[in-house]
Image (cartoon, coloured by chain):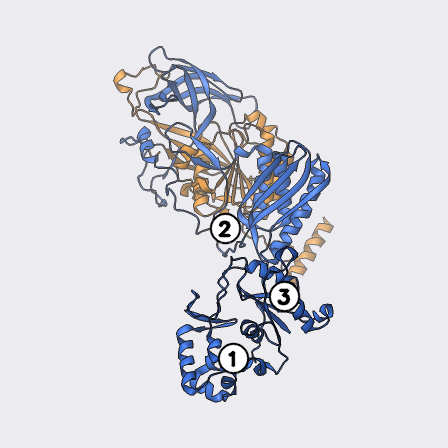
Chain colours: A blue, B orange
Amino acid sequence: MFACIHCPVGTNDESLTDFAYSFSPLVEETAPDTVVLDVEGCELRFGSAYGLANEIARHAVCSKATGGLGSRVNVALAGNPDTAVFAAKFLKGVTFIASGEELTALGELPVEKLFSPRPSVHSPRSGPHNSNLNTPNSGLNKETLDFGPWTLDWKQGQEILETLRLWGVRTFRDFANLPTPGVAGRLGQEGVRLQQLAAGKTERYLKLIQPAPVFDNSIELDHPLTELEPLSFIFARLLNQLCARLLAYALATNELRVQLKLEDRSLHERTLNLPHPLRDHKVFLKLLLLDTELHPPQKAVIAVAIACEPVRPRVLQTGLFIPQTPEPAKLELTLARLAKLVGVGNVGSPQILDTHRPDSFQVKRFFVKNGAERKRRGDGETLGRGDEEKGRHGISESPAFNVPESSSPRVPGSPLLPIPVGFRIFRPPLRAMVDASRGYPLQLSAWGPNRSVYGKVVRLAGPWRKTGDWWRDDCWARDEWDVAVETRIGMAGEQRRTKLSHVLYRIYRELRSGAWFVEGAYD
Amino acid sequence: MRVALSKAAFEAEIISRFGAPFTQQKPPAQVMSTGIAEVDSIMGGLPRGAVTEIFGPPSSGRTSFMLAMLAHAIANKEVCTLIDTSDCFDPVSSGETQVDLDQLLWVRCAANVEHAFKATDLLLQGGGFGLVLLDLGDIAGKDARRIISSWWYRFRRTVENTPTALVVIAADSCVRSCASLALEMNRDADSWSSPAQVLHANLIPPRPSEITHANLLRGIRVRLDRHRPLHSSPRTAQFNGILNNI
């Protein structure tokens, strides 16, 4: 049994829906001014179906403050939703249509009512709508006619109506009494459906209103929490519920927002952004705990709220010949643990900054790209400074040993292919004392907390002048030298024997201060 | 002796009947290319699921070799990580030597060896990495040799039966028996733009006209000697490092 509530004077559909929910949890919002309820079993509460309809009509005229609508409504009870909708829309007051009596109630309605457009429902919580449904020119959608589970093209509907008029069909009863094979042969399946609608013989399920899923959870604590361990149990409970809800909707999340209300009424907010959507509550819990350890709240916690941003789960097609990559959940945990171990700014991917200032880079978040995400090498990430950097060693002469130009795989017997020489940079640069009495470095000594450099300069090349940021206060200018320093180093595998070795360093003299530094070593 | 003979006879009898049940058919070890064809052809590449040790004095080409490995592995879609114990990795020069920095996980340990080993352990336990590089190159040889062996055994056990190649770069040999492949690197020669600027060797100072902007280091020639596996014959490979591509 279905009940339809139609509010002819118009109403806020939100209030109409809320009103309908007070009678049944199964509600279809057919139109902004019309709702259909499944009232099967409600007679146990209201005595009978007719008693329910009367209760709806009586309660609707009550003021909104008392849960009513503040206006009169039409209520119809029928065995199928469409019959209830027609009866509520076109028959005033309370109408009860028993099964098999549909034509008795609706048979005299003009057949044009069958083609009256039904305003579309834009959203479950849309604003007030025009309730004048009987006038075709009411600003409604004239492209299609909405009949619940199926729609009819407006133009086709008008053609069918014109045909019915030519046949002398004036009422629902006339249309229902036509032989179905003839209607099917002349009007097609749409005609048969319309005929069933007129006869009140349709069967369909309600399109129930689904409340928007809520992906946040909160809890207020009886006693303030000052330690992480009891807080972890609160986190676990909230995350468990959140992940269960995500799983129920086949969703995942890539953003967790945690809000801790502290004892002094201030808020401690943290947001965990994940590169890939996850919904494993154990992983979330570990990540949250690691993050809370790194960024602890300053006061005791009295309330916890966790919200997440639901997104579609990641779907990745792997292949037999694609190298294995870390699992996203494990990788996130590993990165969080590494950040806790060595510091947040010391874990990630290096990104070169758009400047010529030496050793300019930043560490950004690391995440594994799949094949499609990977860019071709050099697509704008090095920020266009490579060409100018070539100048420092961009020499036209050939080196002492033969270096072929090609970088293709080596053919046996051909000269050795070169690889770029690596550079180990010293952070910070070592302040050096340099004997440059002849205008070039002769002797070098530099000490730092972790390393030291000293010895005679046996070979050198330079200077190469580099300047930059001259328009700023922190401009820099320096003369660079490449030097080979004679150094005594321990022999590999032998603890007490040393040998003389020439280590290649890059040193520079700051032009502003005149101080010498060791920038790093070629290796 | 009798027991040994009887055992041999027993085994021969079983082999004649059921094949060779006592011979374990180990699958051939998978290797990863180093990115240097010369080294691959002679040394065979980096073994996966094992520890490789590369050691040598400063300026012996260890970092050049490391960058070549990184560039090649990342180009082959391996996920690579570098545990930089002394924080001496230079992204500017390495970014311009074919290393796709986006796909490199860089862990800076600020000269804390304990942090470096713990980070390596975390990364190996996490799994999924193709190449894990532990750079101890600036740690003095005597300090590197003092690293307790249990770390190396632990690493060897962790990477076993995984596709991960763990490469340790050090100033001196320190991984010992846990290394499946040990390569010693030495610089054979270096190339400078002007041969006249040898100062203390023959005390010929450069004339002012010879000190030009173009007179810088141009490249090095590196020699690799294989020390492990012990039972294999020693082999030597060479490659050139150049700076004029930077």
Q: Is residue A492 above or below residue B11?
A: above
Q: Which residue is mark 2?
A: A323
Helix, strand or loop status at disc 2: loop
Label 2 vs label 3, nearer the camera: 3
Marks 2 and 3, the one that precedes in the sequence:
3
Q: Which residue is mark 1?
A: A109
The answer, for residue B177, to whether it is visible in the render is no
For this rendering, which residue is in front, B184 or B78?
B78
- The CA distance from mark 2 to mark 3 is 51 Å
Callouts 2 and 3 close, C-beta under 8 Å: no
Marks 2 and 1, the one that precedes in the sequence:
1
Give the residue type at disc 1: Leu
Give the residue type at disc 2: Pro
In percent of width and height, residue B20 lies at: 63, 58
Q: Residue at x 42, y 40 (%)?
A: B99
Label 2 vs label 1, nearer the camera: 1
Helix, strand or loop status at disc 3: loop
Q: Which residue is mark 3?
A: A26
For this rendering, which residue is in front, A437 or B36?
A437
Callouts 2 and 1 close, C-beta under 8 Å: no
